């Protein structure tokens, strides 16, 4: 009753505790995570069902959302719900160990895979943009990307600055759902962050959740603060209201010298994500409605100026990298021939982790009790006592990360480790150490689940960047292995035509059945990452496959 009232009034917040409204925990978990994605603490724009990442949505429209809720409440333990771009389209009898939900989001036949075609179909109500974890119901707020951002910057510091960002300035833009993690990730690495953001509401949100330390009144003030912090070695993040395509060129003109430059505006979506230079937010919103073509033209031109400024910083000696929003591609389309002169963050900093199946393992306490997460934090440290990076991360996360929605945690774990920890969590649920079951999932940005030539699979050793088979195999295998829900998406991170990727979630409800599912899925899932990188010729992946028993038929012959 209460749930229905909430759904009708659009006040979405996941239920907490052990009382179920569904017919089992697997379905209940999907329902709670769908609702958690749209919790105002979690979603960037819940009124429009937008979770993060431009217009990354959890459901196609409110009717579809209500139908999803009702269908999940009614779904049997031997049934599987099919979701087509945010709309429930069928329920079939399968079997208890099959996934309860299978999701396909934003997929278009390759020749038609452009934003223009997508927007046309979206207008007709036939599809929705699912981003990565928005449409696959495992978004956990900015923490979800915080560790990845922290690790990326730590690796950058190790490669270029002797292992710390102390006395170093990172210049970036975008304080959205994911980009909002940047300032905190910089200060966690002891550096100074200067972050440009066009939308005052987004700025306020990051200040309120302590992801951002303070806001400068204008550019001159920002530069004074930044230079002071750089000099005295203060770890601080400073936000500046403005448009990156205007502010960055101005910073070049003023001779500002950042140590690192990157960007996380929503450049992947030139209509709904990136704000063109020279327009206020209101003017941008009006133009988007009245003349979308003109909007896109201006957005792309602005991205070209934005990238030119980044190249100018690079030429002066700054470390510059693309942060996975396809900004370089747009600039190249606008004639910036050197757009790809700076690397993407995956080949530069992350790939060695992907080679051994390491990636973003996240978990959510369905009890709603933060204590449950603190207990699992303890457990992961107990299981991997020699992992110093993990200890540093968990300690900092406990001190500095404010939960959004259902309490959750993320940490990067490798092949073997994920299954071990998943089973330990299930045991804690079984023993009553935790108050309710736990959802275990991950970002699609992972080792075996993405084909994205300008991001996760940029510059693969064997040139297989654009091969789309791998994420599909990942999703099919996780389905066979008993994940609770599995999703296949198109266009996440970098936009239409540029990526295919898959998600998975598996629920630890304390049962033996869950042991089986967790053991299988948390092995198959990172296993496909090891397989993919071994196949591409990465030696570390080949070694991991041999040592840890990932069977790869043609590896040794
Ligand atoms: P979001 O849409 O929630 O936020 C984007 C922010 O950029 C907004 O606050 C917007 O106001 C701001 N913005 C847009 N144009 C601007 C401009 N010209 N100048 C200044 N600010 C501007 O998106 P998000 O979830 O934060 O993701 C940001 C981008 O990063 C997306 O393209 C996303 O696909 C990509 N991404 C990267 C990673 C990663 O690990 N690097 C992961 C997920 C997503």
Image (cartoon, rainbow, N blue to C red):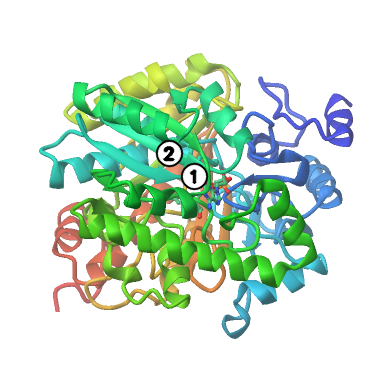
Above or below, 299 against 231 in this view is below
Mark 1 or mark 2, earlier in chain: 1
Q: Is residue 46 left or right of residue 231?
A: right
Q: Position of residue 325 (x, y in %)?
A: 46, 58
> Which residue is denoted by mark 1 in the rendering?
174
* In the image, the residue with mark 1 has its CB under 8 Å from the nearest atom of ligand 1: yes
Q: Find out whether the residues at labels 1 and 2 contact each other: C-beta distance under 8 Å.
A: yes
Name the residue located 53 percent from the left edge and 61 percent from the top edge. 268
Residue 39, image x and y in percent?
68, 32
Location of residue 443 in the rendering, given as x and y in whole percent from the top left corner? 47, 48
Tell me if mark 1 has few (under 14), some (14-19) or many (20+) residues whose alpha carbon lies within 10 angstroms of its own. many
- How far is the residue under mark 1 from the one under mark 2? 7 Å
SS of the residue at dot 1?
loop
Q: Examine the rendering and report whether any part of residue 518 can be seen.
A: yes
Please give left or right for residue 109 compared with residue 479 in the image: right
**Residue bearing mark 2:** 195
Tell me: residue 224, above or below residue 326. above
In this view, the residue in front, 93 or 399, is: 399
> Would you identify the image quadrant in which residue 532 lies?
bottom left
Q: Nearer the viewer, residue 408 or 312?
A: 312
How packed mark 2 is, by other alpha carbons closer than 10 Å (few <14, some 14-19, many 20 or more), is many
Residue 392 in the image: x percent, y percent? 25, 25
Task: Name the mark on residue 338.
Answer: none
**Residue sticking out furthest to the left:** 162
């Amino acid at each position: 009753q209460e749930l229905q009232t909430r759904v009708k009034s659009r006040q979405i917040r996941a239920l907490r505790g052990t009382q179920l409204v569904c017919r089992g925990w697997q379905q209940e978990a999907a329902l709670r995570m769908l609702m958690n994605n749209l919790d105002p603490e979690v979603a960037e724009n819940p009124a429009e069902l937008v979770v993060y990442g431009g217009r990354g949505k959890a459901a196609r429209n409110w009717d579809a959302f209500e139908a999803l809720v009702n269908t999940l409440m009614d779904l049997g333990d031997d049934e599987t719900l099919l979701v087509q771009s945010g709309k429930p389209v069928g329920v079939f009898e399968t079997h208890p160990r099959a996934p309860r939900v299978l999701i396909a989001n934003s997929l278009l036949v390759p020749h038609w895979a452009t934003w223009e075609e997508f927007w046309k179909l979206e207008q007709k109500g036939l599809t929705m943009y699912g981003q990565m974890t928005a449409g696959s119901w495992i978004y956990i707020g900015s923490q979800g990307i915080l560790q990845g951002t922290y690790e990326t910057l730590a690796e950058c510091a190790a490669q270029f600055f002797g292992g710390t960002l102390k006395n170093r300035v990172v210049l970036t833009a975008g304080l959205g759902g994911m980009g909002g993690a940047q300032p905190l990730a910089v200060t966690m690495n002891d550096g100074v962050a200067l972050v440009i953001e066009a939308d005052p509401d987004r700025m306020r949100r990051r200040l309120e959740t302590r992801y951002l330390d303070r806001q400068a009144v204008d550019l001159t003030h920002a530069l004074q603060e930044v230079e002071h912090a750089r000099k005295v070695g203060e770890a601080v993040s400073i936000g500046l209201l403005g448009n990156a395509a205007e502010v960055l060129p101005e910073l070049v003109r003023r001779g500002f010298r950042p140590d690192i430059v990157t960007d996380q505006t929503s450049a992947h979506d030139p209509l709904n994500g990136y704000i063109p230079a020279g327009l206020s937010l209101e003017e941008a919103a009006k133009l988007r409605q009245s003349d979308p073509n003109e909007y896109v033209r201006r957005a792309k031109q602005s991205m070209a100026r934005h990238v030119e400024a980044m190249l100018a910083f690079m030429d002066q000696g700054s470390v510059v990298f693309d942060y996975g929003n396809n900004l370089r591609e747009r600039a190249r389309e606008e004639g910036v021939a050197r757009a790809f002169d700076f690397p993407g963050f995956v080949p530069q900093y992350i790939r060695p982790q992907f080679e051994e199946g390491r990636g973003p393992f996240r978990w959510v306490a369905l009890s709603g009790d933060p204590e449950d997460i603190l207990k699992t934090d303890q457990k992961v440290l107990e299981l991997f006592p020699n992992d110093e990076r993990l200890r540093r991360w968990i300690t900092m996360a406990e001190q500095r990360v404010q939960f959004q929605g259902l309490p959750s945690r993320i940490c990067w774990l490798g092949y073997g480790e994920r299954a071990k920890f998943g089973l330990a969590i299930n045991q804690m649920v079984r023993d009553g150490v935790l108050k309710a079951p736990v959802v275990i999932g991950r970002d699609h940005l992972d080792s075996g689940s993405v084909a994205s030539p300008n991001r996760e699979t940029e510059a693969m050793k064997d040139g297989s960047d654009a091969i789309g088979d791998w994420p599909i195999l990942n999703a099919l295998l996780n389905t066979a292995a008993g994940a609770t829900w599995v999703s296949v998406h198109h266009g996440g991170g970098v936009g239409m035509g540029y990526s295919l990727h898959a998600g998975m979630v598996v629920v630890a409800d304390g049962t033996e059945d869950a042991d089986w599912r967790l053991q299988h899925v948390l092995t198959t899932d990172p296993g496909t990452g090891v397989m993919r990188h071994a196949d591409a010729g990465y030696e570390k992946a080949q070694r991991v496959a041999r040592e840890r028993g990932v069977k790869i038929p043609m590896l040794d012959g």
